Image (cartoon, rainbow, N blue to C red):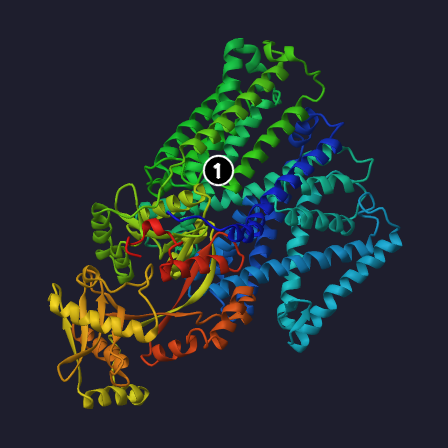
């Protein structure tokens, strides 16, 4: 185990931890403030009045709201279409629109849409040829477009109707109008200037790269359509308040921005508080509350449900093997299949949201008094014991679904079947009790949506993986706060005394709600406590021979030769439950650093990745993934990690590698000169002669002394007879005398090879290493190897002009000017001689802060410093 972080490291780490938890703390505080404001604003409102207003809403009004919602979402998807044009990567319209619709339908409901929508976009667009910079540019462009457009529209409406926010802004109307006009000019003029001149506008440490006027115009039209139709959806549902639509738009824009900035999922509580506070005093508050409730259902949950049903239909279509477009429906799915296929891996998260919402609905319904006549009739028809028991059981089932949603998002098979049973049981009680028939229908529909995704739930491990993360804790606290709000809002006229807990009668609904709320809260709390106590601990230790044998078998069955570094024995090894995947990592400072992604079966890799993150957090450390490739990005996003580009790996396609042609003249010249110097390449297979190993040890020691260096570890091998004895060796000889060597790493599939340890004599001819690489690649080509990896070029390919990230600026600066410490540009230029394909590699960290401390910890592991995970390093270190 690591000797632990120093006090300096701990002090440096505190700001990052605060930044990690701060958004959740702020979100909870704002959610609580929103509930408090709602409770004050709805003090005179009765729950029955709200229910009656919802039921009295005409069908034609509901249909108009549904149509304006669909139109609004089409404009929302237009943001992505416009962004793709802006970055010069247009996609087929059906795919772009489907990706945008999915991102907004799921992101708006889940909340934190910049994160959830970005994950959807990554899955859609990365499979269609866009890189990380492009996808980040799309997400940033759409978020900025919405923020700027909504602000301009809101300020314009406020300039025309300065009294719209009168209850919220205690200022004279003239002052409000002038401030609104000033805000419009402050936003629009710099944007227009930058768009016309195409120059960079710097404001402090921020810079603005505006698109051209055509793109700006299209974005403004899209934003107008988005705000218009979303505001219209609520406007048609609200009672006549004598407020024109333009005036209402200012109120709606302000409420929307407040909800977005709060980072509360969906802006719940914050959005409603602004709308209610801005309504004229003569408007019945119960009518406004009913309209807001309907707006939530129509604008947020209906698109989410439609998108989820579409995803379930697509999954069922795939299960039936109906890939051929035999019907109109099949042809439609074929057209948008790239987008749906890309979104499918997000199904567990989306289903968990559905399960959580279902549990919340069931628990809350147990707190409410009967609203329909059928429910009141059921209370009078069934025995008291049945009524009391069914209410408590419904509340318990709802609380159980809330806890089970954590297992659903972790793809637990047990959680899947328990969820199905709980939802079907809840539907049965809803039918028997005669409560709202929509609840039973929704629960049955939820089970129907779950079933096509059965294959996605394959984990047979504990439900407790990744339990009690900050986000989940915040969600539980919000749910419990919501229980309290609903309970006291529904029974605000009840005089609360201790005797209420023991009153049992068919007309005593407040005591029943208190007991149901207590049971739901206890189940959620006890469930959280159970997860906390059962979260498995993992102690990093030197792997035993059996563990190394299992990991070695998995590594050799794969493609990536770097997986073989698990056999160095200087890293801890975490195996999946079915021993079909592993993850290797080291401990340094406050970091648990995994070298590369998990290796092995895809489903088992996902399990062990979650287990690693859980174990690191349980140990009070930050989980880090060092050198992960593009194929691993979706898993990193699912783990909640932030990606920082480390550099690029050079992979040579041996099928097209040759020394012929004008482009290879310099390489051919060096190779020919090495031949005249008497250099030849031999490849020897294990087992190796002990005398050969001793001769190579002399070369290695000479090289280390000349470089004033010592053996390293973690991501590189070291001179060790057992390590070298596992691999074929490339030997460069000069007139029979070995002058350089390297061990050739590959797997049993022989698809990619690479060199790990490279050492040469000090008096070796110039160009020896270049000759070794060239001759080795030609030899491997003859042996039908498809590819050869030249390894990483650190910090190569960072583009701060595209990403605008602090880390990319810092890394690019080091790459250009860090020659005194490490020849970054020289290494890139050397590898470029072989015309490789460059693949980006990333460092995945829990926060978006520049990863200076994780990289420092990784450097300690590579340098094999004593304080870096000493308990899992070679005893001789």
Foreground of the two, 117 or 500 = 500
Q: Can residue 516 be seen in this view?
A: yes
Q: Is residue 85 left or right of residue 260?
A: left
Relative to 683, does residue 498 appear above or below in the rendering? above
Relative to 99, does residue 690 appear above or below in the rendering? below
Q: Which residue lies at the image location 45% right of the left edge and 77% below the top edge? A: 819
Q: Can residue 124 be seen in this view?
A: no
x, y (%) of residue 262?
65, 46
Locate the C terminus by quadrant.
bottom left
Q: Give the quarter of the image for residue 508.
A: top right
Q: How many labels does the image show?
A: 1
Q: Which residue lies at the image location 27% right of the left edge and 90% below the top edge? A: 669
x, y (%) of residue 809?
54, 69
Residue density around tag 1, few if under 14, some if 14–19, many if 20 or more, within 10 Å? many
x, y (%) of residue 214?
63, 71
Foreground of the two, 652 or 167 = 652
Foreground of the two, 229 or 84 = 84
Q: Give the quarter of the image for residue 348.
A: top left
Q: Which residue lies at the image location 22% right of the left edge and 68% below the top edge? A: 743
x, y (%) of residue 427?
46, 26
Q: Which residue lies at the image location 57% right of the left edge and 19% below the top edge? A: 375
Q: Return the residue at label 1.
A: 468
Q: What element carries label 1?
A: loop
Q: Is residue 669 left or right of residue 527?
A: left
């Amino acid at each position: 185990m690591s000797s632990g972080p120093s006090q300096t490291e701990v002090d440096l780490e505190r700001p990052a931890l605060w930044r990690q938890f701060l958004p959740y703390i702020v979100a909870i505080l704002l959610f609580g403030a929103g509930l408090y404001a709602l409770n004050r604003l709805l003090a005179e409102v009765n729950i029955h009045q709200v229910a009656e207003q919802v039921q009295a809403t005409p069908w034609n009004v509901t249909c108009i709201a549904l149509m304006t919602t669909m139109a609004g979402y089409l404009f929302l998807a237009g943001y992505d279409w416009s962004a793709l044009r802006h970055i010069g990567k247009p996609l087929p319209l059906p795919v772009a629109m489907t990706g945008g619709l999915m991102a907004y339908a799921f992101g708006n409901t889940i909340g934190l849409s910049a994160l959830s929508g970005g994950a959807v976009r990554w899955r859609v667009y990365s499979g269609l040829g866009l890189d990380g910079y492009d996808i980040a540019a799309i997400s940033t462009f759409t978020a900025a477009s919405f923020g700027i457009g909504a602000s301009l529209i809101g300020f314009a409406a406020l300039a025309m109707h300065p009294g719209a926010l009168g209850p919220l802004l205690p200022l004279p109307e003239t002052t409000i109008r002038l401030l609104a006009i000033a805000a419009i000019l402050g936003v629009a003029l710099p944007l227009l200037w930058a768009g016309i001149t195409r120059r960079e506008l710097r404001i402090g440490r921020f810079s603005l790269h505006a698109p051209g006027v055509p793109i700006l115009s299209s974005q403004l039209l899209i934003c107008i359509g988005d705000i218009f139709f979303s505001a219209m959806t609520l406007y048609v549902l609200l009672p006549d308040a004598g407020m024109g639509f333009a005036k209402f738009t200012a109120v709606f824009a302000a409420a929307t921005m407040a909800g977005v900035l709060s980072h509360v999922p969906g802006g719940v509580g914050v959005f409603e508080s602004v709308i209610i506070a801005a309504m004229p005093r003569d408007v019945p508050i119960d009518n406004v509350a009913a309209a807001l409730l309907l707006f939530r259902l129509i604008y947020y949950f209906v698109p989410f449900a439609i998108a989820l049903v579409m995803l379930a239909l697509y999954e069922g279509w795939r299960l039936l093997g109906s890939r051929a477009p035999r019907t109109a429906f099949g042809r439609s799915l074929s057209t948008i299949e790239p987008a749906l296929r890309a979104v499918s891996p997000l199904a567990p998260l989306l289903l968990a949201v559905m399960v959580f919402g279902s549990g919340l609905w069931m628990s809350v319904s147990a707190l409410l008094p009967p609203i329909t006549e059928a429910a009141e009739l059921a209370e009078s028809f069934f025995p008291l014991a049945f009524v009391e028991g069914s209410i408590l059981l419904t509340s318990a089932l709802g609380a159980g679904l809330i806890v089970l949603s954590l297992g659903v998002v972790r793809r637990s098979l047990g959680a899947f079947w328990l969820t199905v049973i709980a939802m079907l049981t809840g539907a049965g009680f809803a039918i028997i009790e005669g409560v709202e028939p929509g609840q039973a229908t929704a629960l049955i529909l939820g089970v129907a949506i779950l079933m096509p995704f059965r294959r996605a739930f394959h984990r047979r491990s504990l439900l407790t993986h990744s339990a009690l993360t900050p986000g989940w804790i915040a969600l539980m606290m919000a749910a419990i706060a919501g229980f309290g709000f609903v309970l006291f809002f529904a029974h605000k006229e009840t005089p609360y005394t201790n005797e209420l807990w023991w009153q049992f009668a068919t007309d005593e609904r407040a005591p029943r709600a208190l007991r149901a709320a207590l049971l739901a809260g206890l189940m959620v709390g006890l469930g959280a406590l159970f997860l906390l106590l059962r979260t498995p601990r993992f102690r990093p230790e030197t792997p035993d021979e059996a563990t190394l044998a299992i990991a070695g078998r998995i590594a050799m069955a794969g493609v990536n030769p770097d997986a073989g570094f698990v056999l160095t024995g200087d890293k801890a090894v975490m195996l999946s439950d079915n021993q079909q995947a592993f993850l290797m990592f080291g401990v340094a400072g406050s970091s648990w650093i995994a070298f590369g992604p998990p290796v092995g079966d895809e489903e088992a890799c996902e399990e062990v990745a979650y287990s690693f993150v859980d174990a690191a957090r349980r140990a009070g450390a930050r989980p880090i993934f060092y050198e992960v490739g593009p194929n691993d990005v979706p898993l990193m996003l699912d783990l909640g990690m932030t990606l920082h580009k480390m550099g690029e790996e050079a992979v040579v396609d041996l099928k097209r590698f040759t020394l012929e042609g004008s482009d290879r003249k310099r390489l051919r010249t060096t190779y020919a000169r090495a031949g005249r110097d008497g250099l030849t390449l031999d490849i020897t297979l294990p087992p190796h002669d002990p005398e050969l190993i001793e001769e190579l040890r002399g070369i290695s020691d000479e090289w280390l002394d000349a470089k004033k260096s010592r053996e390293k570890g973690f991501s590189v091998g070291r001179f060790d007879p057992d390590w070298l004895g596992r691999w074929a060796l490339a030997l460069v000889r000069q007139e029979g005398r070995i002058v350089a060597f390297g061990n050739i790493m590959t797997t049993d599939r022989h698809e990619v090879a690479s060199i790990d340890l490279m050492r040469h004599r000090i008096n070796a001819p110039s160009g020896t290493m270049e000759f070794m690489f060239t001759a080795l690649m030609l030899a491997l080509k003859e042996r039908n190897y498809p590819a050869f990896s030249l390894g990483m070029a650190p910090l190569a390919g960072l583009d701060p002009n595209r990403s605008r990230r602090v880390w990319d600026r810092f890394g690019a600066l080091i790459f250009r000017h860090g020659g005194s410490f490490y020849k970054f540009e020289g290494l890139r230029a050397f590898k470029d001689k072989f015309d490789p394909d460059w693949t980006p590699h990333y460092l995945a960290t829990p926060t978006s802060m520049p990863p200076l401390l994780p990289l420092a910890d990784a450097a300690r592991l590579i340098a094999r410093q004593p304080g870096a995970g000493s308990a899992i390093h070679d005893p001789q270190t």
